[in-house]
Amino acid sequence: MLGALRAVIAGGSQPNDDLEWFIPYYQIRNGGLGRKLQAVVLHLLK
């Protein structure tokens, strides 16, 4: 994906247990980074 920030959180005890997502640069420029990161944290807490 072009024009995106790639973010990875190392996972737990299982192989390939990492969480990876892409945040488009236009969302970052429009103030959407905080909302996107909040959504990821909520996903991790489930």
Image (spheres, helix red, strand yellow):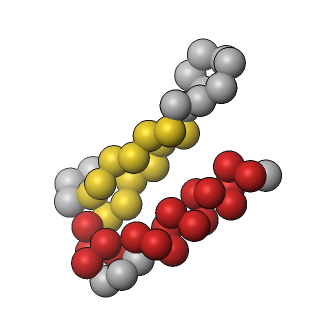
Measured along the vertical axis of the image, is residue 13 above or below residue 23? above
x and y percentages locating residue 41 in the rendered image: 62, 57
> Which residue occupies 59% across, 29% down?
11
Where residue 26 sits, quadrant-wise, is bottom left
Where residue 8 sits, quadrant-wise, is top left
Measured along the vertical axis of the image, is residue 46 above or below residue 15? below
| Residue at the extreme right of the image, as rendered | 46
> Which residue occupies 67% across, 18% down?
14
Task: Tell which of 8 and 21 is nearer to you.
Answer: 8
> Which residue occupies 39% across, 53% down?
22
Horizontally, is 29 left or right of 40 in the view? left
Horizontally, is 29 left or right of 22 in the view? left
x and y percentages locating residue 33 in the rendered image: 40, 70
x and y percentages locating residue 38 in the rendered image: 57, 67
| Residue at the extreme bottom of the image, as rendered | 30
Horizontally, is 26 left or right of 19 in the view? left
